[in-house]
Amino acid sequence: MLGEKTKRLCALKACFASLSPREREIMIQVARGRLNKQIAGDIGITESTVKVHRSRLMQKMKAHSLVALVRMAERLQLIPQH
């Protein structure tokens, strides 16, 4: 039987798997502290497009804040922990 912590991690991984490749890329950049404008310049899209992707990924990840999203990224080991 899976523990509660393992179940939560599996659910988190399922949410991350539901993201498009672009949403995953943007999630990682946002979690690293990059601004929308910086992300847009890095990947060659408009800032408004970054905002759309960011909004969608926040919904799909069920993140209610940027802090929650960063914690999720850390639990998924997408960014180095401090």
Image (cartoon, grey):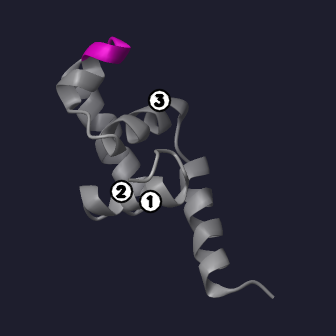
Q: Is residue 77 left or right of residue 33?
A: right
- The residue lying toward the viewer, choosing from 5 and 56, is 5
First along the sequence among labels 2 and 3: 3
- The residue lying toward the viewer, choosing from 13 and 49, is 13
Please tell me whether mark 1 or mark 3 is closer to you in this view. Answer: 1
Which residue is label 2 attached to? 69
Measured as percent of width and height from the top left, residue 63 is found at 35, 62
Q: How crowded is mark 2: few (under 14 residues within 10 Å), some or many (20 or more)?
A: many
Measured as percent of width and height from the top left, residue 9 is found at 60, 68
Which residue is label 3 attached to? 22
Which residue is label 1 attached to? 72
Whether residue 44 appears in magenta in the rendering, the answer is: yes
Q: Look at the image and tell me whether residue 9 can be seen.
A: yes
Q: Is residue 21 left or right of residue 29?
A: right
Q: In which quarter of the image is residue 29?
A: top left
Whether residue 5 appears in magenta in the rendering, the answer is: no
Q: Are marks 2 and 1 in contact (CB under 8 Å)?
A: yes
